[in-house]
Amino acid sequence: MAANRFEIFTRLMGGEQNLPPRLPTPPPKADAGAHGDEIAPEVQDDSDDAHQIVDAFGNLQTIDDFIASEPSLAHSAPSYANQQARNVSQHASGEGSTSDDFTLDPRKGQESNLGMSFCPFLAITKFPYKFVDPKFKQPLATAFFDEGKIYNRPWDIYYTWNEQTAKPITFVTVSQAQDLIDEVNADFESLNWQFDSRHEDEGLLITFDDPNPAYRPYFLGTTVNRSQYDFFLRGVEPYELQPQMAPPEDRSLKAFKEKMALATEAAKNKSKKKNKEKHERNVLQRQSMGRQLAQAQRFLGLRAVEHPEGLTDINSLATASLNVEEPACHPCDSDVVIISVDVESYERAHNIITEVGVSTLDTRDLQDTAPGKSGQNWHQFVRARHFRVIEHKGYVNGKFVAGCPEHFEFGNSEWVALKSMPSVLTQCFHEPFSNPAGVSNIEDPQNKRNIVLLGHDIGQDVQYCHKLGFSVLGRGTMLATLDTKAMYQAYTRDPIPRGLGAIMNDFDFAAWHLHNAGNDAVYTIWAMLATCVRDAAERGTAEAAKKLEERMMTKIESATEAAKERAREELEGWDPADGEGGAAPSKPVMGPEPPQKASVSGHYTVGGAPLDI
């Protein structure tokens, strides 16, 4: 039986070659007085030391004692974490935890998917101090961050090494960071904080899109408190044990190092900003948003088509705005079918996909119908489907977002097995395009319809589709990808992106049961139509100029108030009376001060008190 226990230990260690070395034989005792008054310390006999080994948990045990103990498979892998497991920090709430409370996640070391976006976790922990208006700083920190609160929620932690730091850099997914932001905005409605391009420049948002997995974060584990986070962090092998990833001239390595530098700066209390480069990137990004809006308008017949020779329709030279009570005056570019996709995942485990919504708008249906003020006359042509995953029907969101999978407003929900989801979604991208009741036309292989993929923050939905096994971008006739978040920013000229619900409110649409994937897919098409029609109708008008002026004045006032607040903070504490060496503040007095008592002897203390002896 004893041999079996030792075999278990050897197997857990990965073979005898991985066993810790036996303790060396101590040197013989030195003669007293050989080195003056020094006496060699007393040591145990060689036979005792020869039977001692260092176990995987950092304790000295004899082989016989270890074999006699109960075997444990809780710590199955020898790692850096095991050597320091007894030093796990205390939980933020004051409850002690040791390494015996945790085990390393078996998924540790899994590569992150290509194109995933992350936030540096240490930057998230400093969120109220670096990324919000100063007036919200302390209330927000008290409610969500101070005393370790930020650690006391489920976080999927990823990690990668950086040459600039002694420890690995940890990341969390943007979707989990957005869950936190949603809670913050719910408690501080006037804050209305959103991710935008500035946060990419500051390192708060980082997308890893290199095909080489060495330049992407690895999964570490799911943590729910500070002790578990610290335990997992100690479980990462030291950097010097990692192989070299690439030669110094590798461009991917250079880009990776730049991202790590951004992540490191984002976690610091003060960031070094290259204002000129940042401004140039912002300008390019805004131009891209404007091009998306113009392209969507051409697809809808709201803007003249660009010809390959660089010439545009003569009508595009006119500055007259669109008449929303008449059909679109231009032909629809490329005869496209616009397909909107929205995917919902479980809030506590985002790898669990619960719903997929698909809505379709065929631009052929729009040609004889006036759009209306916000494109509402075209809503009748939107076709929608809502799919729910059978295996995940028990996962319903409710803590961070109000899940409502049973409230599809545009038809009946359809239950689909997880393995069938790729084929079902593929059918939505072919005739009759999300219209199961319609007549299925046989597609002409030589004349397939062009497809435009639409979404609100479309990158996340694309990632979820890939997790389902559906390559949404792999369609042969995929002509373009549009994002309503970017188009709405181009329309409002606002650097801060807005959520789908906020856009619906801005256009006075009654958007019932948001966060239902089928509903959100429809609302995304509504947002595109309203943005394109409103922009075309206001183009070149005095009303549009007035709106732009109002937005500019609002931003100036906001910036002025922020500058005043910073100035007030910088002026505090300069009065000598406020610090050491100044006059002591007087005690509050109820009513008039009592008259000074006179000294009989005529002597007084330094403080003015009578000194009568």
Image (cartoon, grey):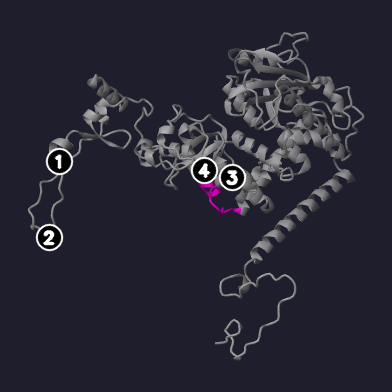
Q: Which residue is mark 2?
A: 37
Give me the C-alpha separation between circle 1 and circle 4: 44 Å
Q: In which image quadrant can residue 18 be found?
A: top left
Left or right of residue 47, residue 168 in this image = right
Q: Which residue is mark 4?
A: 92
Mark 1 or mark 2: which comes first in sequence? 1
Q: Is residue 269 magenta?
A: yes
Task: Give the class, few, some or many, for how many residues have Cα within 10 Å of label 2's Cα (few <14, many ≥20).
Answer: few
Mark 3 or mark 4: which comes first in sequence? 4
Expressed as whole percent of the image width and height from the top left, the position of residue 531 reads 80, 34
Q: Which residue is mark 3?
A: 145
Q: Amino acid at mark 2?
A: Asp
Task: Give the class, few, some or many, for how many residues have Cα within 10 Å of label 1's Cα (few <14, many ≥20).
Answer: few
Give me the C-alpha separation between circle 1 and circle 2: 25 Å
SS label for mark 2: loop
The range drawn in magenta is 260-274
Mark 1 or mark 3: which comes first in sequence? 1
Give me the C-alpha separation between circle 2 and circle 4: 51 Å
Q: Which residue is mark 1?
A: 25
Task: Give the class, few, some or many, for how many residues have Cα within 10 Å of label 3's Cα (few <14, many ≥20).
Answer: some
Q: Amino acid at mark 3?
A: Phe
Q: Nearer the viewer, residue 429 or 68?
A: 68
Q: CB atoms at circles 1 and 2 under 8 Å apart? A: no
Expressed as whole percent of the image width and height from the top left, the position of residue 237 reads 38, 37
Q: Amino acid at mark 4?
A: Ala
Q: Nearer the viewer, mark 1 or mark 4?
A: 4
Mark 3 or mark 2: which comes first in sequence? 2
